[in-house]
């Protein structure tokens, strides 16, 4: 076996880099979205065992909606990408290019088994630049092909070493081959087909048998004229080991998919659900179509489903000529390769094996697949094609008359293929560019029109997206998904009536429900979303909630395992104030999927509605066990802990909020609630920092502004609170508590009685019955020496709150003051004057008591209610202190600091007198 030289490897690497450098500028498109962006198995928080329980797209293999594509090792490489660069597409594309270069070099080593060095390099170069590979290399999900191919070729190379001297068996390479086959299969299913190639190699290449020799030997044995040669027995033993290993892998694979084939719709593969002979004629016609893509990759398309290739429904269809021609050529090559000895026939045979055997799983000939044609599945078959082309080129270049022509043709093919590949890579830059390039090739595929619409929809270009969705319904009028897309886009454009009409059309295309009879037809889960979408639309109308519930129940009757229907119905039942029924819906959904963190979260919301915080917290914790970074569970469980008042839970609540802001660094609510926790813990400096961060992110954050001002007022920084209150009242002029706090600071700190009066008068304009605002206005009148007005004000206040003792007491003080002043005016003696001054001092002490007994600003946070939405808002939360009793106020007044403060105020008033 010839080794690959450094120059050859450098040449291959250079060509690959030249063809695929621009793929590094592409994003995640098409299937990458499901396999990468939406796949939780990539996240470090997801247990590694999930990779071996879920399919390629992160769906549990046990679910019917699973694609049954079991490729855990490929997903593991995605996870490693995520570990180092998260969702930076460059690293994913770079690794794909590296893997493609490795495949090219290993393929060169395989070629040298059957071709000379020059022809092997030609085959490898053609493989490196072939445009058919752009989907496998530039599309990130194509990594499954790349990884599988590496182990596929490695397994074959290992098997070629299993023949020892004197035709003995070397078992170590065979054991390595079996292991590598298993690894290749765990990267992609077609890896198992290398076993067939090893069998063909063993019989026709390693042992040198031809079909006539095998037939002659079999005839002799059957006639009893001979026995099986020892070398043939050894070959049979090796083949038995290989086949047994293969059978074991197949059994394991069947167990993994739980003996269920994936569910595909007629839109994915129309021929699969067509009657005979259309099904057989179409599937056979697809073989020459794939062969033509290898021969002439000028028109490539990322999606060949739906109406891309019309069904071959008649024997008289002219396309059957292409099918017959293909089978004639293929048969001729097979007969030549197995009938005649020699290096040329061996090369042709191995080329054919690499084309045919790896393609069998995708051929639809033995079981249906979810596509009509897929360019990436031609990655391995193109190896055989490149071997045949290189072998043919070798034959032509060996003739002196055709040598120059063959070289010119070779250079031209390599150059044009490289240019086509380079150009094709740009199509994968974004979903819009990819699907628009596909529409240039095929306008009969409604899925492409839909996908362009989705790309525009993601860019919020709903008007233009609607045009493509409508075109999809015209190309394929019975496409349920297209009508659903139209409805959703109308909804985004706030055209509710048109949206409902489109959903109703989609619903009419669904199979009809037979009352009292179990629905047996297999319906694609995404099509059942028409019931969910329609129900979600009409439930915005409070009068149609029952109608929406009926739609959810219809979806459940069609598929009792339709988890999303239970989830949506649970949300509706909560809205209908039926928490017990909502609980039943979520518990039914949990029977279907106990590993769904969102379900446990929603159940926790139900328990909050049922006033059972203990059970709610348990369910939040269960959601976080399954997904430690479940953002809503982190946030709401932290609030629940905070509301419990249990100081022991505060550290855990703080940690959860810290995790939340790590996941959502731009959400001011997280920082605000961290500030509230710090205030509860009397960590004023920390609370101030969190509140300021929340306000920086959301300058009009009502609760953060008020509570920061309140924090300043409680920590003897009242003047710092004023600009914060100004901002609060700029955004929310009717913020009553903000006006009260501002008025209090203006009166007691700034001595701005006029400004304070404006604040309290504004409160009464908004709410004439606001006792606290009116009482404080009475105090302002007292400060302004307008005792009569103060008396009248207190009388009115007392009428609003007749049971408030402090108002009655303050009214008595004001009346006493009025009486004292009247008595003082009637006396003219100096001694009486001195007594009057002393009485005035006592009265003003009483007046300060009135001011200090003003209704204290409420500072306990109005924590609000946790919502059952996917987004929890906390903007209406405000901190208020509970009302203090008269006894508590008297206790506070006895404190030394308060007494000194009153004395200073009294002296100020006396001096002013």
Image (tube, grey):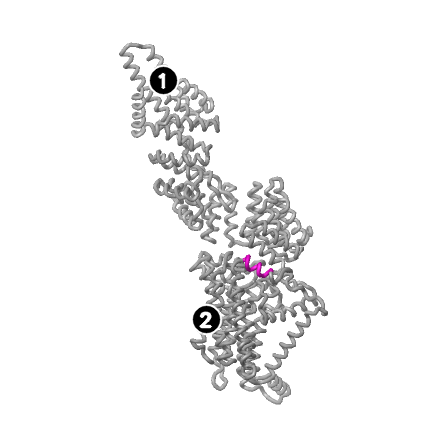
| Place of residue 692 in the rendered image (x, y in percent of width and height, measured from the top left) | 39, 42
User: Main SS type for the magenta part?
Assistant: helix
Disc ID at residue 817: 1
Circle 2 SS class: helix
Q: Nearer the viewer, residue 423 or 685?
A: 423
- Magenta stretch: give its range: 431-439
| Place of residue 734 in the rendered image (x, y in percent of width and height, measured from the top left) | 47, 32
Q: Nearer the viewer, residue 512 or 778?
A: 778
Which picture quadrant has residue 795? top left
Circle 1 SS class: helix
Which residue is found at the position 46% from the left and 41% from the top? 874
Circle 2 residues within 10 Å: few <14, some 14–19, many ≥20: many
Question: Gap in Å between the C-alphas at discs 1 and 2?
Answer: 99 Å
Q: Is residue 74 above or below residue 736?
A: below
Left or right relative to 407: residue 694: left
Q: Residue furthest bottom?
A: 225
Question: Does 239 appear in magenta?
Answer: no
| Place of residue 868 in the rendered image (x, y in percent of width and height, measured from the top left) | 52, 44
Which picture quadrant has residue 294? bottom right
Q: Quadrant of the C terminus?
A: top left
Q: Which residue is label 2 attached to?
A: 13
Q: Nearer the viewer, residue 846 or 271?
A: 271
Q: Are marks 1 and 2 in contact (CB under 8 Å)?
A: no
Q: Nearer the viewer, residue 225 or 137?
A: 137
Left or right relative to 363: residue 852: left
Mark 1 or mark 2: whose residue is earlier in sequence:
2
Which residue is found at the position 66% from the left and 72% from the top? 323
Residue 559 shows in the view: no
């Amino acid at each position: 076996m010839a080794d690959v030289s450094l120059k050859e490897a450098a040449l291959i690497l250079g060509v690959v880099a030249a063809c695929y450098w621009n793929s590094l500028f592409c994003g995640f498109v098409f299937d990458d979205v499901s396999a990468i962006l939406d796949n939780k198995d990539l996240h470090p928080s997801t247990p590694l065992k999930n990779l071996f329980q879920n399919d390629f797209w992160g769906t549990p293999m046990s679910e019917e909606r699973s694609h049954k594509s079991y490729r855990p090792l490929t997903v593991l490489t995605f996870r490693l990408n995520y570990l180092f660069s998260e969702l930076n597409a460059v690293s994913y594309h770079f690794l794909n290019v590296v893997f493609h270069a490795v495949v090219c070099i290993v393929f060169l080593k395989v070629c040298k088994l059957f071709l000379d060095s020059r022809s092997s390099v030609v085959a490898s170069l053609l493989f490196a630049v072939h445009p058919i590979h752009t989907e496998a290399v530039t599309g990130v999900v194509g990594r499954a092909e790349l990884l599988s191919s590496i182990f596929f070729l490695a397994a074959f190379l290992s098997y070629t070493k299993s023949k020892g001297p004197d035709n003995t068996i070397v078992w170590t390479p065979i054991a390595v081959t079996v292991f590598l086959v298993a690894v290749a299969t765990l990267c992609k299913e077609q890896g198992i087909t290398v076993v067939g190639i090893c069998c063909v190699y063993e019989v026709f290449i390693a042992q040198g048998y031809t079909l006539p020799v095998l037939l002659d030997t079999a005839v002799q044995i059957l006639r009893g004229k001979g026995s099986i040669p020892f070398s043939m027995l050894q070959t049979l033993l090796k083949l038995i080991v290989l086949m047994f290993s293969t059978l074991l892998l197949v059994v394991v694979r069947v167990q993994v998919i739980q003996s269920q084939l994936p569910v595909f719709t007629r839109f994915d593969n129309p021929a699969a659900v067509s009657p005979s002979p259309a099904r057989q004629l179409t599937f056979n016609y697809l073989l020459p179509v794939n062969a033509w893509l290898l021969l002439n990759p000028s028109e490539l398309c990322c999606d060949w489903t739906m109406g891309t290739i019309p069904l071959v429904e008649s024997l008289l269809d002219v396309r059957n000529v292409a099918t017959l021609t293909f089978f004639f050529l293929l048969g001729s090559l097979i007969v030549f390769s197995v009938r005649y000895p020699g290096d040329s026939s061996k090369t042709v045979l191995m080329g054919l094996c690499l084309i045919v055997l790896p393609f069998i799983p995708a051929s639809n000939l033995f079981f249906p697949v979810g596509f009509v044609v897929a360019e990436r599945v031609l990655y391995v078959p193109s190896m055989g094609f490149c071997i045949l082309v290189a072998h043919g080129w070798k034959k032509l270049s060996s003739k002196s008359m055709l040598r120059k022509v063959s070289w010119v043709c070779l250079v031209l093919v390599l150059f044009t293929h490289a240019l086509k590949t380079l150009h094709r890579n740009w199509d994968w830059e974004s979903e819009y560019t990819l699907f628009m390039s596909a529409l240039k090739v095929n306008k009969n595929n409604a899925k492409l029109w839909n996908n362009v619409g989705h790309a525009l929809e993601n860019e919020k270009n709903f008007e233009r997206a609607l045009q493509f969705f409508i075109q999809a319904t015209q190309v394929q009028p019975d496409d349920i998904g297209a009508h659903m897309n139209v409805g959703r886009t109308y909804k985004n454009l706030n055209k509710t009536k048109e949206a409902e009409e489109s959903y109703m059309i989609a619903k009419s295309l669904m199979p009809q429900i037979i009352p009292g009879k179990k629905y047996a037809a297999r319906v694609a889960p995404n099509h059942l979303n028409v019931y969910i979408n329609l129900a979600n639309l009409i439930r915005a109308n409070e009068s149609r909630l029952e109608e929406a519930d009926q739609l959810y129940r219809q979806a459940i009757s069609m598929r009792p395992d339709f988890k999303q229907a239970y989830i949506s119905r649970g949300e509706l039942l909560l809205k209908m104030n039926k928490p017990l029924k909502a609980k039943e819906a979520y518990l039914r959904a949990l029977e279907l999927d106990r590993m769904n963190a969102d379900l446990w979260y929603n159940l926790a919301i139900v328990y909050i509605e049922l006033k059972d915080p203990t059970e709610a917290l348990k369910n939040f914790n269960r959601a976080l066990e399954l997904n430690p970074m479940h953002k809503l569970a982190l946030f709401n469980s932290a609030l629940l802990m905070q509301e419990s008042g249990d100081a022991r839970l505060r550290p855990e609540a703080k940690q959860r909020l810290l995790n939340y802001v790590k996941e959502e660094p731009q959400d001011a609510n997280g920082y605000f609630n961290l500030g509230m926790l710090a205030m509860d813990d009397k960590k004023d400096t920390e609370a101030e920092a969190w509140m300021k961060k929340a306000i920086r992110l959301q300058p009009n954050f009502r609760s953060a502004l008020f509570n920061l001002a309140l924090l300043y007022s409680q920590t003897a920084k009242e003047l710092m609170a004023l600009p914060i209150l100004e901002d609060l009242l700029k955004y929310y002029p009717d913020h009553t508590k903000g006006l009260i706090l501002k008025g209090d600071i203006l009166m007691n700190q700034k001595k701005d009685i006029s400004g304070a009066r404006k604040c309290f008068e504004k409160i009464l304009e908004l709410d004439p019955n606001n006792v606290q605002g009116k009482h404080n206005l009475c105090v302002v009148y007292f400060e302004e020496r307008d005792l009569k007005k103060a008396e009248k004000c207190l009388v009115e206040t007392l009428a609003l709150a007749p049971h408030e003792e402090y108002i009655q007491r303050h009214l008595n003080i004001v009346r006493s003051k009025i009486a004292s002043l009247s008595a003082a005016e009637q006396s003219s003696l100096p001694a009486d004057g001195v007594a009057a001054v002393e009485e005035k001092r006592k009265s003003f002490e009483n007046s300060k008591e009135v001011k200090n007994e003003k209704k204290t600003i409420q500072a306990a946070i109005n924590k609000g209610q946790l919502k059952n939405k996917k987004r929890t808002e906390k903007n209406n939360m405000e901190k208020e202190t509970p009302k203090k009793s008269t006894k508590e106020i008297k206790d506070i007044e006895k404190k030394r600091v308060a007494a000194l403060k009153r004395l200073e105020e009294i002296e100020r008033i006396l001096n002013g007198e």
